[in-house]
Image (tube, helix red, strand yellow):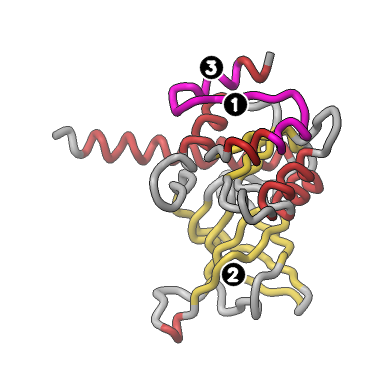
Amino acid sequence: MFRELGTVFLSRYGRVSTTASGEEALERVRRERPDVVVVDLHLPDLDGTRVCYEIRTAPATADTAVVVMGSHSAEEHARAIRAGASDVLPKPLSRVILVESVARFLTPGPPRGLPRIGLRTPVRLRSESGEHWGTVRNLSRGGLFIESDWTPGGPEEVALEFALPEGSRRLSPTAVVVWQSDAATGAHNSGMGVRFAGLDREVSRRLDSYVHERWAASRGAVARGNPG
């Protein structure tokens, strides 16, 4: 039933092909080279992260975007990210989020970014080198830009702790540092872009709701201010 619904949701963006197992999916990917693969984390024969890893590490399919769905825990989310997932979606799945995720990988050139909002809130970072502090400057459901005088020496997974402005509960995901900027080299702000790794379903949904509500409101304000 889910495969049929997914086909209905995604068919407006191109031809949709479905399979019932991980092995069948891998064989189809090798033969047809799709632009995007949507794979469930829990399959009857293979773990979804194994399917993702096989696709992302094979030279012939390494550029294929893989959207992994069905993460419930921070550990599952992190496993999918480490396996090379292009996006990770929790269940029960939102049709809007599924379509948004797939569509961003189908445009020519680099994939479109996720909806992102400006934010200013303190964040604590813990890494192998110790504890550090910074300021979250923008947020998407996939990650953060953190302004900080400290940046790691290279790609690294760090533990974060921060709170959304309207929330009292602190969020504690882990994240992978994917890029860094240094004011000494001409960047506007010293800091780093991080992608969430360990992110459980509840926190993922809170972030998604928070970002989309404010992103939609900001888009509405721009539209009302520029009616022409």
Q: Amino acid at mark 1?
A: Ser
Residue depicted at 56% across the width and 31% down the height = 98
Q: Which class describes the residues within 10 Å of circle 1: few (<14), some (14-19), or many (20+)?
A: few
Q: Amino acid at mark 3?
A: Val
Residue depicted at 49% across the width and 45% down the height = 114
Mark linked to residue 134: 2
Q: Give the answer, above or below, for where 125 lies relative to 75.
A: below
Q: Amino acid at mark 2?
A: Gly
The span picked out in magenta is: 5-27
Quadrant into which the C terminus falls: top left
Mark 2 and mark 1 residues within 8 Å of each other at the beta carbon: no
State which mark lies toward you, 2 or 3. 3
**Looking at this rendering, what residue extends furthest in the left direction?**
228
Q: Which residue is mark 1?
A: 94
- Tell whether 204 sits left or right of 21: left
Q: Which class describes the residues within 10 Å of circle 3: few (<14), some (14-19), or many (20+)?
A: few
Would you say residue 172 is visible in this rendering? no
Q: Which residue is mark 3?
A: 8
Mark 3 and mark 1 residues within 8 Å of each other at the beta carbon: no
Give how far apart the Cα atoms at labels 2 and 1 are.
32 Å
State which mark lies toward you, 3 or 1. 3
Residue 222, picture quadrant: top left
Q: Nearer the viewer, residue 45 or 191?
A: 45
Residue depicted at 49% across the width and 56% down the height = 138
